[in-house]
Image: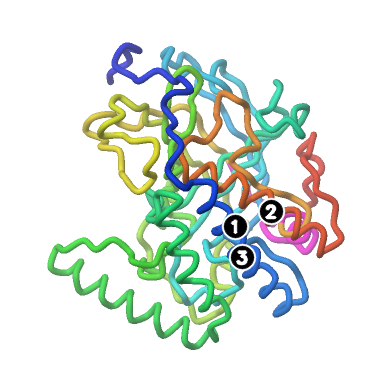
Amino acid sequence: MTTNPLTYVRYSDDVEVKQPNEDEQSRQAVESMARVNRLMFDKHRHAIRDAHAKSHGVLRGELQIYDNLPEPLAQGLFKTPSTYPVIIRFSTAPGALGPDGQPTFRGMALKVVGVPGTKFLPEEADALTQDFLLVNHPVIPTGTVETYLKAQLKQEPAADTPPVLQKAKSQLVTGVHKALDAVGVALEPADPLGTGKPNTHILGETFFSMAALRYGDYIAKLLAKPISEGVKALQGQEIDGSNDSALRDLVVDFFANQGAEYELAAQLCTDLATMPIEDGSVEWPQAQSPYQPIAKLVIPSQAAYSPARRVYVDDVLTFNPFHCLPEHRPLGNIMRVRRLAYETSSQYRHQMNAQPRVEPSSIDELPD
């Protein structure tokens, strides 16, 4: 394992480069997302997130920072060995409450609680939380603001497509992917929501930050992978999605009887040419810089989706990659537009649902 800090690109403000028309494209993308938010509110008479709207489990766990990390990995939150309580939300990517028979990207959002230090967002400088948002795909298919805007404007007219048509499209795309896989041909999903992915068990997935973030004095991408036997056994396991809440039921049933462990790892940037910051669609080569373990996520057996927890995570909490220490600030233009998008969506959701927006100061605020 290479640990020489001279092999890693050091963070500086210069690693980010503002893109042509970035501000205007960001504005258009967020306005489109806001229109979809209003459409979803009119449909459900309840405001939902503009991405990862459907939750499948809300869990209490611990993030255990490993001891004796080499200097390049011992950065920010991971600088010293510590154990933090954490709230975990499992979700699926669309900004709509679709049936679980429709394959799509899965999400794991982590809210680490009790984190000292001034936070990046000025309005939350005194908050005690650090968020990491992870998805079961190593890159963002729409990796720049320009491509993100094109995809968003293309998806907006289909936001209220009847579920039966969504399911038919998903089955068609999934069938194409399976046929190509059988002959060894890989096809990147044309749909940035990943509707062509196999419909596999959410707890067996490996989850990625997709885009880059500052990692103290360095730059990194993160992942969380299953390491306990119970969740490792679920890797690649296809599910029966005939029940619209199949994923929730799988999460609830699993944690009713056992716990789970995932390992967090960091991939440090070694070359800005092959590991770009401003294009989140480029997968950083692991042969050039492998993921290295930094912490363990331990989730005990528990009731994973009580009514009180559902309301707390869906209506009260906000998960935002910019809820962070400055040492872990998201980087790149696709992340900069997400800063505006997350804030706009969160404000609308809390206003329309008449719920407070709270950053917890204690894990005890998570209901049982």
**To which residue does mark 3 refer?**
54
Q: Decide which of tag 1 and tag 2 comes sooner along the chain.
A: 1
Image position of 31 with respect to 331: above or below: below
Q: Earlier in the sequence, mark 3 or mark 1?
A: 1
Q: Are marks 1 and 2 in contact (CB under 8 Å)?
A: yes
Camera-side residue: 90 or 239? Answer: 90
* Amino acid type assigned to the residue bearing label 3 in the image: Lys
Residue at point 67%, 73% (across, down)? 40
Count of marks, rendered view? 3
Up-down relation of residue 44 to residue 213 (above or below): below
Label 1: element kind: helix
Residue 228 shows in this picture: yes
| The disc label shown at residue 197, or none | none
Mark 2 crowd level (few <14, some 14–19, many ≥20, 10 Å Cα): some
- Give the residues drawn in magenta, as a range: 299-313
Nearer the observer: mark 3 or 2; the answer is: 2
Along the line of sight, which residue is nearer the eye, 230 or 78?
78
Which corner quadrant of the image does residue 308 belong to? bottom right
Estimate the spatial distance between the alpha carbons at disc 3 and disc 1, rounded to whole Å.
20 Å
Labelled pair 3, 1 in contact (Cβ < 8 Å):
no
Whether 160 is drawn above or below 304: the answer is below
In the image, 210 versus 86, the foreground residue is 210
Indicate the amino acid at tag 1: Val
Across and down, in percent, residue 57 comes to: 63, 58
Q: Is residue 55 visible?
A: no
Position of 95 compared to 116: left or right? left
Q: Residues within 10 Å of mark 3 (few under 14, many from 20)?
A: many
What whole-number distance in Å separates the C-alpha atoms at marks 3 and 2?
18 Å
The residue identified by callout 1 is 30
Considering the image in quadrants, where does the N terminus appear?
A: top left
